[in-house]
Amino acid sequence: MAMGTNIHTYYYFFLSMLEAIMMVLVHVRAHAPSTANYKFSLNARITKPTTTPQLISADRKMEYSEDAAKIRSEFLQVLRSRRTAEVPLSVEPAEPVKDPLYQEIPKPTFSEAMESCPKKEIPNFKELLQEENFYLTTEAGEQGHLPVLILKLKETSQKRRPAIVFLHSTNKCKEWLRPLLEAYASRDYIAVAIDSRYHGERARNLTTYRDALVSSWKKGDTMPFIFDTVWDLIKLADHLTQREDVDPSRIGITGESLGGMHAWFGAAADTRYAVAVPIIGVQGFRWAIEHDKWQARVDSIKAVFEEARNDLGKSAIDKEVVEKVWDRIAPGLASRFDSPYTIPIISPRPLLILNGNEDPRCPIAGLELPESRAREVYTKANSVENFKLVAQPGIGHQMTSLMVRQASDWFDQHFNP
Ligand SMILES: *[C@@H]1O[C@H](CO)[C@@H](O)[C@H](O)[C@H]1NC(C)=O
């Protein structure tokens, strides 16, 4: 038994070392023109005592990319720690979902913001639109079946097109995103949506997501809040980069609310997501605990916190309950993987954070630290223009038409479809 544990420990240690090395290599490759700088800074590290400011700055740059590789590999280790068996990535055809499952009552029907996305006027658009539905196998077991919906134009002048992955909010599903998918498809993107864990086709009834959160608290064997879906996003990137119609260097990621958190962590974990726009998702989990501003976030998935309160023998949910729940169901979310650490590691890739200035679930003061840290890292990488945070005045926890347009402009600006 102890032997097996040791072998596993060494195996994972070996894997994470390998990953860290690969990340640095991939990073150097992806930034071919600056390879010389990297060599330079590697040398600078070996010969250490240098005094010219240029050398110091190259040295610091290297330290930041080492930090990023370290956080990324630690995060992957957490994702791997609660996985069912690995299976080969396979694609299974699926039928379009006629009656998608929403885990909220009443069923949502229309969103002005969703409908407001810039489109290209194309005659016979519906006939030119091609739809794909399939399941991607991301691990063993029922939740290892990732439902994917893709919309794209049948005909295009581009050999390989940019792809954008869209992530839905709590209790919704990939079909909810159709208006966005169509708008991006009309502009010659490959528009991709998935059902998050325990949502849409991965849910059985109206309480599946809630039940999964409670079960994770009880058993500690899954990570239904954010992390398990990030695992799927890594597998999705494997698939997208292998497709002949996708330009692997132009894959973007965006999402609303819970989907904004998925976009944030997906981009942090996997550098193949080249441009990211998390919408009303980025927040300071630790900040909220320390400043007594966790209530609105807790209310959005109350059942698991109520269960924990009861198990801990308390009469009310307090900051200790909040901290224990995060630690248990998403280890590191309110500490080493919180936004001050996982937002800067998206640098130097273009990152636009869109929030509401009055959002109680993502209090704006909680973004000060991740913002200032990110700005520093992007500046060091000579990419300060690639980082932007917009907090829309007078807006609470709501994705607005303005945000939809800003996200769309950001992708156009960087992917130029
Ligand atoms: C939903 O499904 C689960 C698992 O099959 C079951 O335990 C639960 O009671 C169901 N809930 C409702 C509201 O039907």
Image: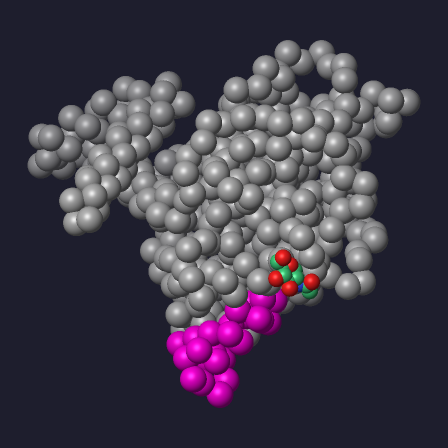
Quarter of the view holding residue 55: top left
Asked if residue 200 lies left or right of residue 308, the reply is right
Please name whichever residue, 62 or 375, is drawn nearer the observer in this view of the structure. Answer: 62
Residue 135: horizontal and vertical position, in percent? 62, 33
Q: How many numbered discs sit on the rendered protein?
A: 0
Q: Is residue 383 above or below residue 334?
A: above
Please name whichever residue, 198 or 282, is drawn nearer the observer in this view of the structure. Answer: 198
Q: Is residue 84 above or below residue 218?
A: above
Magenta residues?
296-321
**Colouring chosen for the image of the structure:** one colour
Going 76% across and 47% down the picture, which residue do you hit? 100
- Quadrant occupied by the C terminus: top right
Q: Is residue 348 above or below residue 220?
A: above
Please name whichever residue, 283 or 243, is drawn nearer the observer in this view of the structure. Answer: 243
Please name whichever residue, 203 or 158, is drawn nearer the observer in this view of the structure. Answer: 203
Q: Is residue 298 magenta?
A: yes
Judge whether residue 409 can be spotted in this image.
no
Going 51% across and 74% down the picture, which residue do you hit? 307
Farthest residue, direction right:
123
Quarter of the view holding residue 189: top right
Residue 297: horizontal and vertical position, in percent? 56, 67
Q: Main secondary structure of the magenta part?
A: helix
Residue 22: horizontal and vertical position, in percent? 31, 27
Farthest residue, direction bottom:
315
Asked if residue 8 lies left or right of residue 151, the reply is left
Residue 411: horizontal and vertical position, in percent? 62, 34
Going 26% across and 31% down the picture, which residue do you hit? 18
